[in-house]
Image (cartoon, grey):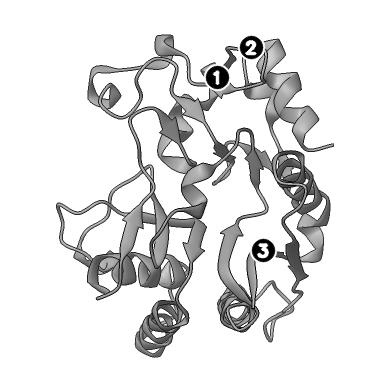
Amino acid sequence: MKEVCFFTTYDSRAREMAQGMINSVKHWYPDIPMEALEIDIQDESGHFDVFNFCYAYLRHGLKLLDEYKRIIYIDPDSVMCNLCPDLFKDYDLGVVRNNTGRGPEGGGRREDVYINAGLSVCTNKDVWQERINEYEKRMNQGRNCLNEQNALNWTYHNTKYNAKLLEFNDRSYGISSLDHYQGIELRDKEGNVCLDKETMTKDTELYLPSNKKLCIFHAAGTYWKTGTKINFDFITNELARETMKGYTC
């Protein structure tokens, strides 16, 4: 069995954006394979079928776990902008915190953190199957566009396996820092992109101290994307902006 792969899934509209994400991963980890799956699924009305897209993506991850000891899923609207050592640590499931909260309907207690599905690491086929089972259960109860993300959130909070929240005081793995992307800066010759202290507020100081490395930029939602184009121009600092764009080329 092979050691590790990155993987992503996308539909044809996001092909260029996905390639940019893949290029950024290859910049930092040129020797680790990237399994990229283009999935074009339409519903009866001819629109993008997000529900069956999620089924296909989850089944693809399960299949990859027959071939690799570790799979690292990254959404195509992401940019890797630093080395990411925490993606390779010892746990069964690694997940990231969302930038918003959610109550028990998301699979946890109201005071729990809410998980985002844009980045996940798995080294255990059983815990990935738990995720699929929970998604199927939620789909049987009703079609909700957050079913897949809520299933991951439920799995993180309820699995018997070793689940790790990839949230740290000095480095960020994505969307929990989304409200502070605009002020990112380039702080050293190695090309490390960091969050700017000037963007901090009292409420977020605990999670976003000065010089916190941004390991993965996740342009989730509509503000940071126009269609399937990431709005890099929203980054105020020119050097940081051009460096981020350069990782995707």
In front: label 2 or label 3: 3
* SS label for mark 2: loop
- Mark carried by residue 7: 3
Q: Which residue is mark 2?
A: 237
Cα distance between the residues tagged 2 and 1: 7 Å
* SS label for mark 1: loop
Q: Quadrant of the C terminus?
A: top right
**Mark 2 or mark 1: whose residue is earlier in sequence:** 1
Of 68 and 115, nearer the camera is 68
Q: Type of residue at label 3?
A: Phe
Q: Quadrant of the N terminus?
A: bottom right
| Rendered view: 84 above or below 119 | above
Write down the quadrant of residue 2 in the picture.
Answer: bottom right
Residue 178 located left or right of residue 3: left
Cα distance between the residues tagged 3 and 1: 26 Å
| Rendered view: 189 above or below 38 | above
Q: Type of residue at label 2?
A: Asn
Q: Residues within 10 Å of mark 1 (few under 14, many from 20)?
A: many
Image coordinates of residue 175 in percent, x first then y, are: 47, 42
**Mark 2 or mark 3: whose residue is earlier in sequence:** 3
> Do callouts 2 and 1 mark residues in contact (Cβ within 8 Å)?
yes
> Do callouts 2 and 3 mark residues in contact (Cβ within 8 Å)?
no
Q: Which residue is mark 1?
A: 184
